[in-house]
Amino acid sequence: MTHTRSLNTFCVAIAGGFALACSSPALAQPAAPIGVGPTYADLADLADPAELVIRAEVRRQARLKPERAPNVRPGYGRLYIEARTVSLIAGSAPIGESIRYLVDVPLDADGDPPKLKKQQVVLFARARGRPGEIQLIAPTAQLRWSEPLEARLRPILAELAAPDAPPSVTGVREILSMRGNLAGESETQMFLETEGEGPVSVTVVRRPNMAPVWGVSWTEIVDQAARPPARNTLAWYRIACFLPRELPSEANIARDPASRSQAEEDFAFVRQSLGPCRRNRS
């Protein structure tokens, strides 16, 4: 798993002699509404920056007083949790049988947090401080565990850990559309910005009386035979969830109006073909 964002942390001293427990506001997201589970993008958002993905059983919870829980979003409370490690789903850092962490949870209509004791949860975290202390990668980076959830999560973790995992896309470096010899024939090449400077290019080919075709290449070679990524895969997520909504004007390096217009049309075509990147943790 790779880190795709810079995280600013906050720490709260826990009474009773425990060391600092920390969390991070940078990826703060609410839990999904009741009855609405996390999407592929939700799970990838959580798994990508996590050093540890832990299945745990809550043993004890205590709500922090508001003055000791800064930056909690309205309608949420911060809990100090002691839990038993059930299994390490992903990660190599050593963790003990007992873990401690902070998590923000939605409050009910009476302003009370849910009772989590004996519930099993999935934690997206990194090791922090003394043995047994972990830091969630976001204040709400805890999901209720279930077999279907873990079954959906494991393929994402496997893709993230693969040596040839697609790099994180951060934007469009440049795009150029070139007209062919026949009317209605063109090829558009789009080169994406990535973390770590891994090569990613998108090619759109149009031929007379044929539907446009496009594909993604994850190597230095621009490949006309490349195909679009399958939905709900890491390759799809990298592009569908991080391409800008509109093509930046400065990235369009064609000079003539027709070529610039074709590049914009092909960018919109790729965006539409990818489909929406839905998230329930907004």
Image (cartoon, rainbow, N blue to C red):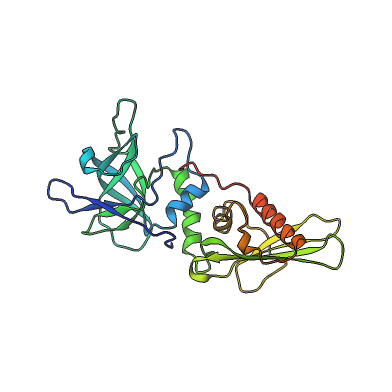
Q: Position of residue 171 (x, y in %)?
A: 55, 61
Visible in this render: residue 142?
Answer: yes
Identify which residue is drawn at 38% across, 52% down.
26
Residue at the extreme left of the image, as rendered:
17
Residue 106, located in which quarter of the rendered image? top left
Residue 183, located in which quarter of the rendered image? bottom right
Pick the residue in front: 59 or 81.
Answer: 81
Visible in this render: residue 98?
Answer: no
Relative placement, left or right, of 128 versus 273 is: left
Identify which residue is drawn at 42% across, 42% down.
146
Q: Position of residue 136 (x, y in %)?
A: 33, 51
Pick the residue in front: 41 or 264.
Answer: 264
Residue at the extreme bottom of the image, as rendered:
220
Depicted 281 relative to depicted 206: above or below: above
Q: Position of residue 158 (x, y in %)?
A: 48, 59
Depicted 85 relative to depicted 186: above or below: above
**Quadrant of the drawing holding the N terminus:** bottom left
Identify which residue is drawn at 30% across, 25% down.
110
Identify which residue is drawn at 50% across, 69% down.
163
Relative placement, left or right, of 54 versus 269 is: left
